[in-house]
Image: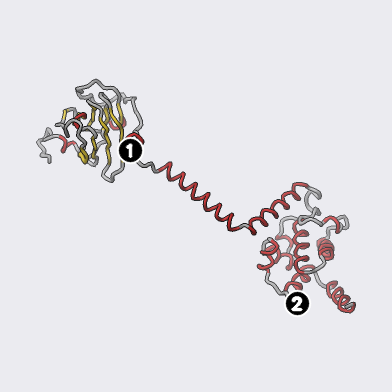
Amino acid sequence: MTTENTTNTEMHADMTVGEMLRNARTTGRRKREIPTVSKQLCIREEFLQALEDGNYTVIPETVYILGFARNYAMELGLDPDEIVNKLKREMGLGAECDAGEEKNDAPACGGTDANSPQDVWYHKLWGRVVKFMRRYWIWVLCGVVVLALGIAGIIFATTHGVDNAPENNLAPVETTLAADVPPEPEYNVAVRERFGTENRENGNVILQATAESWVKVEDRRGNTVFSRVLVPGDVYYVPAGDEYTAIFGNAGGIDVWVNGKLAPAVGADHTRVSGVSLAPGKLMPSDATGTDVE
């Protein structure tokens, strides 16, 4: 046993720290690859490879070079104090960094604030976080998935509203009229409130409630552009174009105006009518040019 220890000591004396680490990892009964050791120590593979190659510039701070070397040596069954002291000599750090200062995973020696409590605190905290995540990784993964699904659900709910009832999807009230707009028809009921005024300059069709009625307007894809219970006097300006249809909860309570003229009633009082085309040519029996309508 004495002869073997003497031989190992003499062999180590002629080897660099990197050679000692590589030799311990690749020989004997516990041969291991760097990725395996990296996962066990939670140290990046390139840092372990840098220690074996003696390429210490890859590791950003001297404190981490010494700390990683100590942990690596302990994992490989080498004397950590011998490795650290030998590494200091190779790096020319001097005698002030004695072996007693590298007891923590992030030793305070060389380069930065020697006894920075922030460095020690950060390293210990990060080590605990990594250890926790390795032990409970399945719960951490589930938590991340649940959080992601929750965020996605909130985003979807706020950007894709569903119109399930007339009262739940009310169009914004717009009472401010533009300065230059076409003249209003001679309504049968005094105007109470106006909706869809952004369509006033270009639209040809106007709906006015003479009795309380629910009105829903959809485009050709079935998307709701307006949904509201109108009370007598309320006016809605239909967007320009022939692609819109309407549902009237009380068809007899809605006057339909086309280019300033009152169109025929679309239904009787207290009658629900759906699929009403709001194309000007289909609302009037014929227009000024004599165009036939269905």
Please say if 108 is above or below 15: above
Answer with left or right where residue 36 lies relative to residue 96: left
Residue 229: x and y, percent? 29, 31
Residue 216 position within the rendered picture, expressed as x and y whole percent measured from the top left: 27, 36
| Element type at mark 2 | loop
Residue 101 picture quarter: bottom right
Q: Residues within 10 Å of mark 1 (few under 14, many from 20)?
A: few
The correct choice, above or below, for 229 with respect to 50 in the image is above
Work out whether residue 148 can be spotted. yes
Task: Judge whether 37 appears above or below 259 on screen.
Answer: below
Residue in the foreground of this view, choosing between 19 and 139: 139
Type of amino acid at the residue the image marks with label 1? Ala
Q: Which of the numbered marks, if any, corresponds to residue 130?
A: none
Q: Which mark is residue 165?
A: 1
Please, which residue is most extreme toward the top here?
190
Helix, strand or loop for disc 1 = loop
What is the quadrant of the N terminus in the image?
bottom right
- Residue displayed at 76% across by 62% down: 71
Identity of the residue drawn at 71% across and 65% down: 48
> Which residue has dot 2 on it?
28
* Quadrant in which the C terminus appears: top left
Whether residue 257 appears in this view of the structure is no
Q: Are marks 1 and 2 in contact (CB under 8 Å)?
A: no
